[in-house]
């Protein structure tokens, strides 16, 4: 048995307290530490202001109390959360020499990253379904997308994400870690953590692959089916401004969906040797740092209702 310690009860204590992870981040580019710090700081500031601003605008404006904006406010909340789980630690590691993170801190960070990323995956699917109902059954929209159904869809997204997080965390916690390990990423991303385990991470990696593939396939099926029906419906419309409006809304939604899902598929659903850790880091930056910043702009600021709401708020306060 490879555990150290005088008694069985002291094993977890020995393992977790003696294990230290050092997040490598972007330390192989010493000259880029300050520019990257400034870039990520600006990105994070815009993310926080954009997403919390969106939530505030939706809450304050009764005109925006519709299913689409209910889902959007949850998307903004999720974006704010998972950016906050990752970016502050990333910023800290760009300016301090000591890049250590405790075993517990690392496991917690992974748990919340997983929770919010899986929630986002299904929230985007729920929003695609919502657009499908709005475009294909406009007369039944308010009946079909009842407040009860909207709450259930959001609750289901969070519940499934929590389940995935617990399962994947369990498979990390049953691994054996020892000593000080360098994690070749800026966050406790699953593959980078299990890569430094002192026991065989095969089962953990297999479960990650199965869950990620299931989540991707199921959510993408919902999204693609919804958009196929939307396109068919729109093509039957008379060629007026209405057709353009639906297409422009759907195009912006599909932009986010394409960037987000392509990064997730690259990272988790294609079994690679992970030889290019730089590529992994860049993909991780995209889905954890860049997309939470882009979502408020892509989904909302191009939207007439939101622009009107912002104008009304401005004029009433100044």
Image: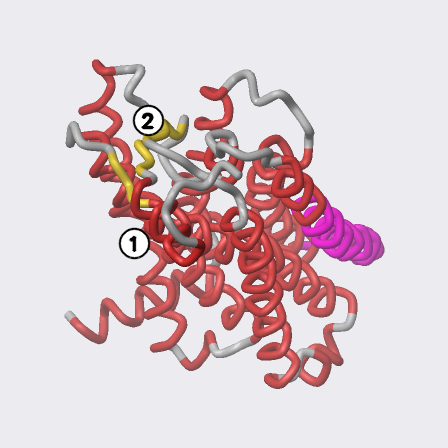
Q: Against 143, is 298 above or below?
A: above
In the foreground, 85 or 64: 85
* Residue 238 visible within the image: no
Residue 197 in view? yes
In the rendered structure, the answer to whether residue 285 lies left or right of residue 53 reads right
Q: Which residue is mark 1?
A: 48
Numbered mark located on residue 252 in the image: none
- How crowded pointer 1 is (Cα within 10 Å; few <14, some 14-19, many 20+) is rated as many
Q: CA distance from mark 2 to mark 1?
A: 25 Å
Along the line of sight, which residue is nearer the eye, 199 or 145? Answer: 199
Residue 236 highlighted magenta (yes or no): yes
State the SS at label 2: loop
Callout in the foreground (2, 1) = 2
Contact check, label 2 and label 1, Cβ < 8 Å: no
Task: Please report the residue visible at 62 percent of the width from the left and 78 percent of the height from the top.
Answer: 152
Q: Residue at x 69, y 47 (%)?
A: 216
Image location of residue 138, percent across then percent down: 73, 73
Q: Which residue is mark 2?
A: 24
Residue extent of the magenta highlight: 212-240
């Amino acid at each position: 048995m490879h555990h150290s310690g005088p008694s069985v009860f002291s094993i977890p204590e020995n393992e977790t307290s003696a294990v230290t992870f050092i997040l490598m981040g972007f330390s192989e580019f010493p000259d880029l530490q300050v520019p990257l710090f400034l870039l990520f700081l600006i990105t994070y500031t815009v993310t926080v202001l954009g997403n919390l601003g969106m939530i505030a605008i939706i809450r304050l404006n009764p005109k925006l109390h519709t299913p689409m904006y209910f889902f959007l406010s949850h998307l903004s909340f999720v974006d704010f959360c998972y950016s906050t789980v990752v970016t502050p630690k990333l910023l800290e590691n760009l300016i301090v020499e000591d890049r250590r993170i405790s075993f517990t801190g690392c496991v917690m960070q992974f748990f919340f990253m997983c929770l919010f990323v899986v929630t986002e995956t299904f929230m985007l699917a729920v929003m695609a379904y919502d657009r499908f109902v709005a475009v294909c059954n406009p007369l039944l929209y308010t009946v079909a997308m009842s407040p009860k159904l909207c709450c259930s869809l959001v609750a289901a997204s969070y519940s499934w994400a929590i389940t995935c997080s617990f399962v994947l965390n369990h498979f990390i916690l049953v691994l054996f870690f020892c000593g000080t390990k360098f994690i070749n990423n800026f966050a406790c991303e699953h593959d980078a953590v299990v890569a430094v385990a002192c026991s065989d991470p095969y089962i953990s990696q297999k479960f990650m692959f199965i869950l990620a593939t299931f989540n991707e396939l199921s959510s993408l099926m919902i999204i693609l089916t919804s958009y196929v029906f939307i396109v068919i419906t729109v093509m039957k419309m008379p060629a007026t401004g209405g057709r353009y409006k639906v297409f422009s809304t759907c195009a912006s939604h599909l932009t986010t969906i394409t960037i987000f899902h392509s990064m997730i598929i690259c990272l988790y659903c294609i079994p690679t040797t992970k030889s290019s850790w730089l590529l992994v880091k860049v993909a991780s930056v995209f889905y954890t740092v860049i997309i939470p910043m882009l979502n408020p702009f892509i989904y909302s600021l191009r939207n007439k209702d939101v622009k009107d709401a912002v104008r009304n708020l401005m004029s009433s306060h100044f």
